[in-house]
Image (cartoon, helix red, strand yellow):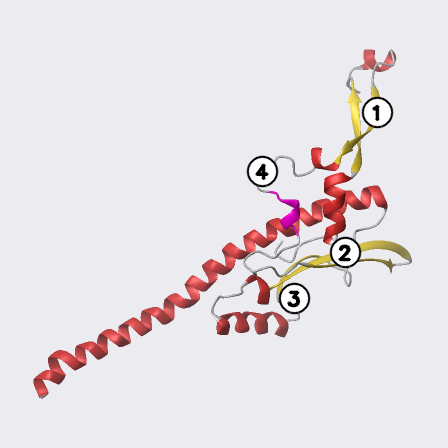
Amino acid sequence: MKKVLTYVVFPLIILLLAYLLVSGINKPVKFKKEQTAREQAAIVKLKDIRTLQVAYKNVNGKFASEIDTLVEFYKNGNMTVIKSIGSADDSVAVARGLVKREAIQIPVRDTLLKNRPDFDPDQLKYIPFSDGDEISMEALIKEVSGVDVPLFEAKVPYLSLLKGMDHQLVVNLIHERTDTDRFPGLQVGSIENPNNNAGNWE
């Protein structure tokens, strides 16, 4: 019986403990790697939303409160682009009146994000890896230092973005964020604290 314990049971126990130790160390590392990959996918969407919001505000004087409005703007809207004819550095051309600046209307889809083959406007509102959860977005005009300022924010909560990952590690991450008064997820812009449309990852 002693030999069985020595040569069979104890080695198995040691192997099991070693496996549990390595697994315990690797779990947070794998979680962080997957978290980073998912965050990068969400950041791309939030940056696209910001790009469209800035263009929408330039045309309409305020931000859109719904992502569907931005999608419609992207698909069917127009924006003003200044077309330059001649060079302002050419003094002869300037003297002859050959240098001109002309405002022309161009479809948004032909101007913004046109070099992004991965951009799909119909998927813009959906949080990656979330099985259809939607990015929440708000927009308003708020008085800041006596001036009315258009503001917007778009949010991707970790509960949606990290769906299906280790539940306890997700809960720990959310608690860590809320305990330090930070949004538990990714956010661009803010309707509470104007931040020049910055993302909380920047």
Per the model, the C-alpha gap separating discs 1 and 4 is: 30 Å
Q: Which mark lies nearer to you, 1 or 4?
A: 4
Taking 116 as reference, is 149 above or below it?
below
The answer to which of marks 3 and 4 sits earlier in the sequence is 4
Residue plotted at (57% across, 72% down): 176
Q: Which mark lies nearer to you, 2 or 4?
A: 4
Residue labelled with disc 4: 117
Which amino acid does the dot numbered 1 rest on? Glu
Residue plotted at (13% across, 84% down): 5
| Label 2 Cα crowd, 10 Å radius (few <14 / some 14-19 / many 20+) | many
**Image spot of residue 155 (x, y percent):** 67, 60
Per the model, the C-alpha gap separating discs 1 and 3 is: 44 Å
Instruction: Quadrant for residue 99, please give it.
Output: top right
Q: Nearer the viewer, residue 41 or 84?
A: 41
Instruction: Quadrant for residue 21, please give it.
Output: bottom left
The answer to which of marks 1 and 3 sits earlier in the sequence is 1
In screen coordinates, is 94 left or right of 2? right
Per the model, the C-alpha gap separating discs 2 and 4 is: 26 Å
- Circle 3: element type: loop
- Circle 1: element type: strand
Residue labelled with disc 3: 183
Residue plotted at (79% across, 36% down): 78
Residue plotted at (80% across, 55% down): 151
The answer to which of marks 1 and 4 sits earlier in the sequence is 1
Per the model, the C-alpha gap separating discs 3 and 4 is: 31 Å
Which amino acid does the dot numbered 2 rest on? Phe
